[in-house]
Image (cartoon, coloured by chain):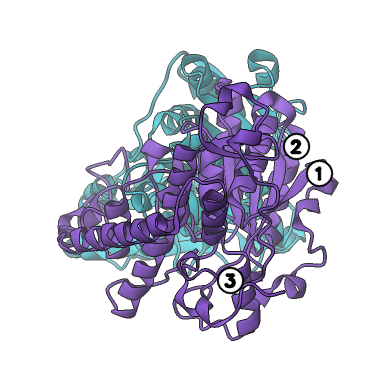
Chain colours: A cyan, B purple
Amino acid sequence: MAKITYREALNQAMCQEMERDDRVFLMGEEVAQYNGAYKVSQGMLDKFGPRRVIDTPITELGFAGLGVGAAMAGLRPVIEFMTWNFAILAADQIVNAAAKMKYMTGGQYDCPMVFRGAGGAAARVSSQHSQAFENWYANIPGLKVVMPSNPADAKGLLAASIRDNDTVIFIENEINYGDVGEVPEGEYIIPLGKAEIKRVGKDITLIAHSRMTGYALMAAEELAKMGIDAEVVDPRTIRPLDEATILASVAKTNRAVVIEEGWRFAGIGAEISARIMEKAFDDLDAPVVRVTGKDVPMPYAANLERHALPSVAEIVEAARVTCNRA
Amino acid sequence: MKKEPLAFLVVESQAHRHSSHPSLGIGDVMTTKKSTDKNQDKQAGITQEGRFYSADRLHAMHDMMLFIRRFEEKAGQMYGLKKIGGFCHLCNGQEAVCVGMEEASEPTDYMMTSYRDHGHILARGSDATAIMAELLGRAGGIVGGKGGSMHMFDVTKNFAGGNGIVGEQVPIGIGFAFASQYRDDKRVSITIMGDGGVNQGAVYESFNMAALWKLPVVFVIENNQYAMGTSLSRASAETHLYKRGISFKVPGIQVDGMDVLEVERKMAEAIEHARSGQGPIIVEMMTYRYRGHSMSDPATYRTRDEVDEWRTGRDPIARLQLQMIAAGLATEEEFKQKDKDIKKEVNDVAKAAEAQPEPDLSVMWDDILNDEIPNAYPYPRQVG
């Protein structure tokens, strides 16, 4: 297996799907001539030409809606938001149009398309450019929400998302774009709605997605030194959620910490905690603990930014408390 | 000199109380005898501005406008009886726009509009019973009872809504045009908005991209003078809405939206412009809605005189009737009989729709996803 970056893995997935299906096109700001603001679409203009790799004006609502119409007309758009912060401008088309088009047309029209781009906190860009919105979209029937945590998942999940016949919200992570990992060559598909156990353990379940999966794995190494054997579960698809994998893990470990970069209130951790309470209450030896971003807009100063985000140390501490080893 | 309106010509009852305005603009009507087109000499019809309309076609246009008028009246009546719920926006007065545009377009052209959509989808030729059933929330509704008045769709007629968020359909419309250009299949996207919708930012994002990429789209602005209760001059700095594309190099034309033949003629030109690869064009249809914004709106923001001026002086159905009578293509009695027939037809439609059952509760879970994932939460078709 070749070792490539997360961004190259995303690029491979898009190229793979565009080669097999002429209906697939990539549209967004700076995706073509500039090769992508984060170089995810490097070389794609040369490979596929301006018909299928299309630079847009800075006009998120407009090109999101264009994608919706193109999908309704039978194409398979991949609409890139430079970051998900800017997608708020396009929320009407995602929420009011794409998510419910199949429903409110009685199944006559649908929107098989991918909205993708960088989400979560970037580095030192303050409040408007460092936000996690997966819980917004995960709340809405008609949408699927996918978030890869490593290069192989990035490739397999994006290919699956493009092939999926529904609207997929695909949230990448800017900090992860340069991560290197082994990625299968050739066609590679990871089915949506399947979690993966990233580390097998027996004492506690750490549930984390996107960039936080890496943090959870680092925390697990720290915990191992303390004699706590943590299992790390990455849902990979946030909606719909493979809770069976989570619940099976909790049934084994009897303890769980849910980690997310986003805000705590009505977050993904709140949903997962509620499901563990509803479905696995008797398996629990301790309350589920959540580690989340602090309930503040993201500050700029380096120390404040670090303080606002979840840390490996916080995850370790939460796990120790949950394991009664604090 | 005032001319008394011909009673049968006035198709809105309140309009009888005032004299009509004499200028219905029928001076340019020629019967076929005066036509210079030899091929048309044998056929009865009307030539307006050099464009020939056969008697059959004129009757079809008239009948559809009248059908829409009576359908909307029936919908208003059913709403008053609380048989139709929610929001219900009628298009009485705007029928020439619906029918003229449809006449000018190909069935393969895409069309989408906002929530004032009954007239457009009827003009496209969708099943009237299914449309009425949708209004009534019945199983046989055109979208299965899931959309109601604002969300009429018919994929078989390339009618893409029925969109409830003002201006939302405009980027979607250029998406259809993009697909047409992508596949090079020469289909035009007829993207309709109102004089309210034209102030949404999404519209200008769409004008820009459509012009930049020369997308085959006709932006139709139905200027009925009021965005809900806000008159055009209270909402728009530039009230000549056909000029709104100037900054984007989108040309625009203004059309008398109360003249179905002018609508057809100008739309045909606009559609040809878009289809031939010259990019988007704006068509501003000057029209008027006789009713309030929605059924809950008594429309106190405008004067009775203003409404009557449009109803009696410029009514699109009465206008076409006058033209057809002048051309010897129909008589007053025939139109009276036609109106009776259409009223009966609409009543039958309403009865048939009302006789339908409500949707089965199980369909609530249908049509959310194409690819359901059975073992992931939220589980398909389950609570919790």
- N-terminal of the pair, mark 1 or mark 3, is 1
Q: Decide if residue A175 is in sight here.
A: no
Of residues A139 and B290, the one nearer the viewer is B290
Of residues B305 and B272, the one nearer the viewer is B305
- N-terminal of the pair, mark 2 or mark 3, is 2
The image shows residue B225 at horizontal and vertical percentages of 67, 68
Pointer 2 chain: B
Q: Secondary structure at mark 3?
A: helix
Q: Secondary structure at mark 2?
A: helix
Looking at the rendered structure, the kind of residue marked 1 is Phe
Q: Measure how far apart labels 2 and 1 are at the Cα level.
A: 7 Å
Reading the image, the residue beneath label 1 is B248
Give the quarter of the image for residue B79: bottom left
Q: Secondary structure at mark 1?
A: helix
In this image, B2 relative to B190: left or right? right
In this image, B346 relative to A77: left or right? left
Reading the image, the residue beneath label 2 is B211
The image shows residue A8 at horizontal and vertical percentages of 60, 24
- Vertical placement of residue A200 versus B3, above or below: above
Pointer 3 chain: B
- Residue at 78% x, 48% y is B245
- Residue at 63% x, 72% y is B3
Marks 2, 1 in one chain: yes
- Vertical placement of residue B381 versus B102, above or below: below
In this image, A113 relative to A302: left or right? left
- In the image, farthest residue toward the right: B247
Q: Alpha-carbon neighbours of circle 2 within 10 Å: few (<14), some, or many (≥20)? A: many
User: Which callout, 2 or 3, points to the residue nearer the camera?
Assistant: 3
| Label disc, if present, on residue B312 of the rendered structure | 3
Q: Are marks 2 and 1 in contact (CB under 8 Å)?
A: yes
